[in-house]
């Protein structure tokens, strides 16, 4: 591939939604979860999506992941997708290493390669020496690191994250912000990260997408040109978070952190 061809490839969205609409039910039970959502994500871009509960954030991720189908509009995904939830969803009878290795096995990676690759992935998420532990022996933050390693084992180019740090204490969450940012940038992943925490959205995102409710729709998108790494409580993040929160409140969507 020539330099020009490589540059052109990087301008093609790895994820492209146009007029995406999702309706659940029919008649009096009909609910429009998403309406006319259009969103592009570039290769390697970290996009955070923030909005109140019920605005369709998780529905959007489910559509991108192929867990559900849109009622209208088009969705083009140009890469493998891995989905990370608020709960680590690890298999409790398997060790940390076995949970990661299972993803490799499902991809038909040869048995001879799986153990070495599993150890490599656990090292990437700072879990060297913890592979023999079962989920109940790990902290919440460590379980999420295993879940991240399992996503990497799926050879994904697009990582979908549905409030993966929402159940963690503030200190653990701050550490994982740094680690997630390092991992996804080193691996060149595109990320769509759902949160209800405005500061978290700005801390991590190259671009923040604000969503409104009833029906779920995009209200505003904003590029975040602050240099990395960022600090959650920095004045720059606090100011931008206040501005974007006011924007949501002005449109009747106040319940975000």
Image (cartoon, grey):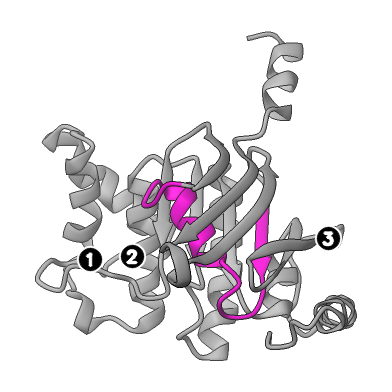
Whether residues under marks 2 and 1 lie with C-beta atoms below 8 angstroms apart, the answer is: yes
Earlier sequence position, callout 2 versus callout 1: 1
Mark 1 vs mark 3, foreground winner is 3
- Disc 2 is placed on an element classified as helix
Query: Which image quarter is the C terminus in?
Result: bottom right
Badge 3 element? loop
Nearer the N terminus, badge 1 or badge 3?
A: 1
Report if residue 127 is visible in the image.
no
For the residues labelled 3 and 2, the Cα–Cα distance comes to 29 Å
Dot 2: within a 10 Å radius of its alpha carbon, few (fewer than 14), some, or many (20 or more) residues?
many
Give the x, y percent position of residue 221.
80, 58
The residue labelled by disc 2 is: 146
Kindly identify the residue that appears in the image at 37 percent across and 82 percent down: 140
Find disc 1 in the rendering and name its residue: 96
Q: Which mark is residue 224?
A: 3
Mark 1 crowd level (few <14, some 14–19, many ≥20, 10 Å Cα): many
Q: Is residue 119 left or right of residue 247?
A: left
Picture quarter with the N terminus: top right
Span of residues in magenta? 46-69
Task: Judge left or right: residue 180 versus residue 248.
Answer: left
Q: Is any part of residue 152 visible from this angle?
A: yes
Q: In the rendered view, tell whether residue 112 sits above or below residue 122.
A: above
The part of the image, by quadrant, that contains residue 129 is: bottom left
**Which of the marked residues, 3 or 2, is nearer the chain's N terminus?**
2
**Alpha-carbon span between mark 2 and mark 1:** 6 Å
Indicate whether 19 appears above or below 130. Answer: above
Q: Quadrant of residue 81?
A: top left
């Amino acid at each position: 591939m020539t330099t020009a061809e490589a540059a052109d490839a990087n301008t093609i969205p790895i994820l492209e939604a146009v007029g995406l609409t999702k309706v659940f039910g029919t008649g009096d039970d009909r609910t429009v979860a998403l309406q006319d959502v259009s969103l592009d994500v570039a290769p390697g871009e970290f996009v955070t999506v923030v909005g109140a509960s019920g605005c369709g954030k998780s529905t959007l991720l489910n559509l991108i992941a192929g867990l559900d189908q849109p009622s209208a509009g088009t969705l083009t995904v140009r890469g493998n997708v891995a989905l990370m939830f608020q709960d680590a969803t690890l298999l409790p009878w398997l060790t940390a290493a076995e949970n990661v290795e299972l993803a490799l096995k499902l991809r038909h990676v040869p048995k001879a390669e799986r153990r070495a690759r599993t150890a490599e992935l656990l090292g990437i998420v700072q879990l060297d020496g913890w592979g023999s532990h079962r989920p109940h022996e790990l902290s919440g933050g460590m379980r999420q690191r295993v879940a991240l390693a399992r996503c990497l084992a799926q050879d994904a180019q697009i990582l979908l994250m549905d409030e993966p740090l929402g159940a963690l204490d503030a200190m653990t969450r701050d550490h994982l912000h740094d680690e997630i940012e390092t991992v996804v940038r080193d691996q060149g992943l595109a990320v769509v990260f759902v949160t209800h925490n405005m500061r978290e959205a700005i801390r991590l995102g190259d671009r923040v997408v604000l969503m409104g409710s009833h029906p779920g729709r995009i209200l505003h998108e904003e590029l975040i040109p602050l240099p990395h790494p960022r600090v959650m409580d920095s004045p720059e993040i606090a100011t931008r978070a206040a501005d974007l929160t006011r924007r949501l409140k002005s449109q009747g969507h106040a319940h975000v952190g």
